[in-house]
Amino acid sequence: MNNSSSAAPVSKKTINFSDATFINDVAHFRNVLRQSIPHGVVAKVLLFEADVYAFLTRLIALGLEQHTVVLPPNDQLGTLNELAEHVDYCCGAVSVSGKTLLDEHASTVQATPQQTENAPLAWPTEGNIVFFTSGSSGKPKAIVKDWPLINNELATLASLFEIQADSVFISTVSHQHIYGLLFRALLPLKLQCQVTNTIEYPEELASLIKQHQQVILVSSPAFLSRLKQDNVITDVANRLSYVFSSGGLLAIQDALTLHYQLGLAVTQVYGSTETGGIAYRQQSAPSDDLWQFFPGVSCQVEPQSRRLILNSPFIHQQHMPLDDTGQLIDGKLKLLGRIDRTIKLEEKRVNLTQMELCCKNHKWVTDIKLLVLEGKRTVLAAVVQLNAKGWQHLQQEGARQVSQQLKIHLQQHFELVTIPRKWRYLTELPFNAQGKLPVKELEKLFV
């Protein structure tokens, strides 16, 4: 099994879904599916395609034929190897040994008669999409969403945010994940807006924004944190209608700096693959820490543990326990930390999220990730991203002195036995494109 090495490079052109070309391409790929998959069989199809136009052509066609679409989070060999045994076919820019690549049949299938410009796009209402998350153990975990749930959330997003029809969606996140799929692929498709393929660098963003008048940026905390350091889009910021961020929490200082630089508050989205969107917020002042629930979504709070219990039209399970704790204030949500990040050290309980937030308040720290290292004894370790002032102290005084100062800072709020024993310093935490930190990679820093 290997990646398709012959795939064309991803184009950066703007794609418009409002004409008949896309509808015809979907219809043609439906014919490919009908002639490739036996009649009456509901197949599981592995779909990976970096080009958003090609991706959506195949996704919509598969959905209309009611096949189950399996979305790998990336096209790495290890990922595809793990998922290959669970599918019948593959589709897009991947090649899996022993599995039929449906795209190879496209050239042999007769083209569909051209639709008129006024022909409506058919939209899937049945079938499933399977996402994979890393899970708490790091092993891929399947999350199944059916099209009715996807459509419920899309309808909510379309009605909640005031997005003009001539908007162009620019994204730094992949559509292979739920956040990217909804916000940078299906939502512009639903609204007949335009969309570009994924970009990686702020310089690309600046170039694209200059080409359009109404821009919506779909991004992650990791990209936005880099952008604010030397913001190259301030002179075209008036063209931004929305900046969306999800995949993790955007640091308050990053949010406030971006608001100052862009004149626009970042719309942060709280949720997960399992839950769908739960709430959103826009921070233009330090006090703006409450989350507004999406319409139809609500949470209850368990009295003792403060654990959040979710009810949502974006999931089938009602009263879903979350791994987050929180507080309800005037119908809005204040997040207090994750339940699954409360650990015991020397019989003392400590919430790692709270400790990370405390450490970020230090004048030398930009970001931090705490890790629990298991061995003869459980040890708490810290990977710290220092700011310029922090690096200056590191170079002048050494890592030991910097660690000591951070420990003194934490001891104002946490007992000594819970303070991290091991420290490592980086210029930047290695977030991936989805705004997640690869924990296994960080653990290697302490080997």
Image (cartoon, grey):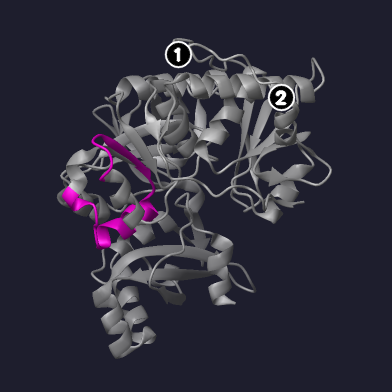
Place residue 396 in its image quadrant. bottom left
Judge whether 64 appears above or below 285 on screen: above
Residue at 73% over, 33% down: 102
* Kind of residue sitting beneath label 1: Glu
Q: Nearer the viewer, residue 133 or 215?
A: 215
Q: Residue at x 17, y 51 (%)?
A: 235
Q: Is residue 310 left or right of residue 9?
A: left
Q: Is residue 370 magenta?
A: no
Q: How many marks?
A: 2
Q: Mark 2 — residue?
A: 32
Which is in the foreground here, disc 2 or disc 1? 1
In which quarter of the view is residue 331 placed?
top left
In the image, residue 351 above or below residue 425? above
Of pointers 2 and 1, the one earlier in the residue sequence: 2
In the drawing, what numbered circle is on residue 18?
Answer: none
**Residue located beneath label 1 in the image:** 117
Residue placed at 51% from the left, 60% from the top? 344
Secondary structure under the numbered disc 2 in the rendered image? helix
Is 231 contained in the magenta span?
yes
168 over 6 or under it: above or below: above
Q: Which residues are magenta?
A: 210-235
Q: Position of residue 1 (x, y in %)?
A: 77, 51
